[in-house]
């Protein structure tokens, strides 16, 4: 329960009981609960989406989903997405890019990247009325992408919380994190959902590999950028209209 509370307090702004200072082992153990936290966030987002559809329109509902997602997560992943693109857009040295990601200010490249991301998500959300389950699962899949990135690539800074996350995760953590995403995907979205899950995670790993090469490892901002891309690709594939 303590580990789950740590994961919730780390990934959301939901008020939680104080649990004191967490050890590196405890922070590493929170990885297994990341997708479960994503699923809870997805449930809240989808609930507000349904309210928006019933009271107004799919367009308003899509905005409610985006606003809910940003508020509950404290825009943590979106901030990482913007910082990552600001660093990449600077075309500077590796050390300078890492410093840019530390800067609390947002540049033109990061702002543009955020607008494009949110615009594409909004467009996907307004066509999702018939597949609400995908909106619940998408944040969980994004968190699986983060889990895979932490375990597959080194941390890019000398010090930071990410060092604890990159330590090998226990087997039960793998079962929990993957199961929370895979089981509901198969149960509710069937084959299209499973394909979307596989494609989004492969794209996420490729994106994480690119960022790791650029920065000499991943950072907290990189994890946010991975989360956002995996979530986006999952929705893109789920709602793709394929005709043969």
Image (cartoon, rainbow, N blue to C red):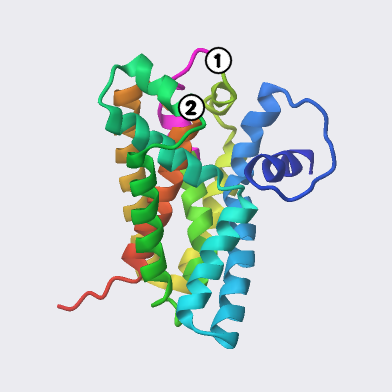
The reply to whether residue 184 is in sight is no
Task: Give me the disc on residue 103.
Answer: 2
Query: Quadrant of the rendered structure where residue 120 is?
Result: bottom left
Query: Callout 1: 10 Å neighbours few (<14), some, many (20+)?
Result: few
Image point (64%, 54%), residue name: 72
Front residue of this view, candidates 99 and 169: 99
Query: Quadrant of the rendered structure where residue 125 is?
Result: bottom left
The reply to whether residue 228 is in sight is yes
Image point (40%, 50%), residue name: 114
Task: Give me the disc on residue 48.
Answer: none
Number of numbered labels in the structure image: 2
In the image, residue 38 sits, relative to residue 239, either above or below, namely above
Q: Earlier in the sequence, mark 2 or mark 1?
A: 2
Q: Give x and y (percent) for residue 34.
A: 59, 45
Image point (29%, 28%), residue name: 90
Q: Give x and y (percent) for residue 204.
A: 36, 44
Residue 148 in magenta stretch: yes
**SS for dot 2:** loop
Check the picture and name the quadrant holding the C terminus: bottom left
Q: Left or right: 81 with respect to 162?
A: left
In the image, residue 187 sits, relative to residue 110, either above or below, namely below
Q: Give x and y (percent) for residue 65.
A: 54, 67
Q: Which residue is mark 1?
A: 159
Check the picture and name the quadrant holding the N terminus: top right
Residue 4 in magenta stretch: no
Magenta part of the chain: 147-159
Q: Left or right: 239 with respect to 140?
A: left
In the image, residue 197 sits, relative to residue 60, either above or below, namely above
Query: Callout 2: 10 Å neighbours few (<14), some, many (20+)?
Result: few
Image point (66%, 30%), residue name: 27
Query: Quadrant of the rendered structure where residue 116 is?
Result: bottom left
């Amino acid at each position: 329960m303590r580990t789950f509370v740590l994961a919730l307090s780390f990934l959301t702004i939901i008020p939680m009981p104080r649990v004191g200072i967490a050890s590196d082992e405890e922070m590493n153990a929170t990885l297994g609960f990341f997708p479960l936290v994503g699923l809870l966030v997805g449930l809240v987002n989808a609930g507000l989406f349904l309210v928006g559809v019933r009271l107004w329109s799919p367009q308003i509902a899509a905005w409610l989903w985006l606003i809910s997602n940003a508020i509950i997560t404290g825009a943590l992943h979106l901030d990482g997405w913007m910082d990552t693109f600001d660093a990449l857009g600077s075309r500077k040295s590796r050390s300078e890019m890492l410093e840019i990601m530390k800067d609390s200010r947002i540049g033109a490249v990061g702002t543009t990247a955020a607008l494009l991301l949110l615009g594409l998500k909004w467009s996907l959300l307004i066509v999702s009325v018939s597949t609400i389950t995908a909106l619940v699962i998408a944040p969980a899949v994004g968190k699986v992408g983060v889990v895979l990135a932490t375990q597959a690539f080194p941390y890019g800074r000398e010090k930071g919380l990410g060092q604890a996350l990159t330590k090998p995760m226990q087997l039960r953590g793998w079962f929990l994190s993957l199961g929370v995403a895979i089981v509901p995907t198969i149960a509710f979205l069937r084959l299209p959902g499973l394909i979307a899950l596989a494609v989004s995670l492969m794209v996420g790993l490729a994106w994480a590999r690119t960022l790791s090469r650029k920065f000499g490892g991943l950072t907290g901002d990189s994890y946010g950028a991975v989360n956002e891309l995996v979530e986006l690709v999952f929705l893109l594939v789920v709602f793709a209209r394929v005709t043969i």
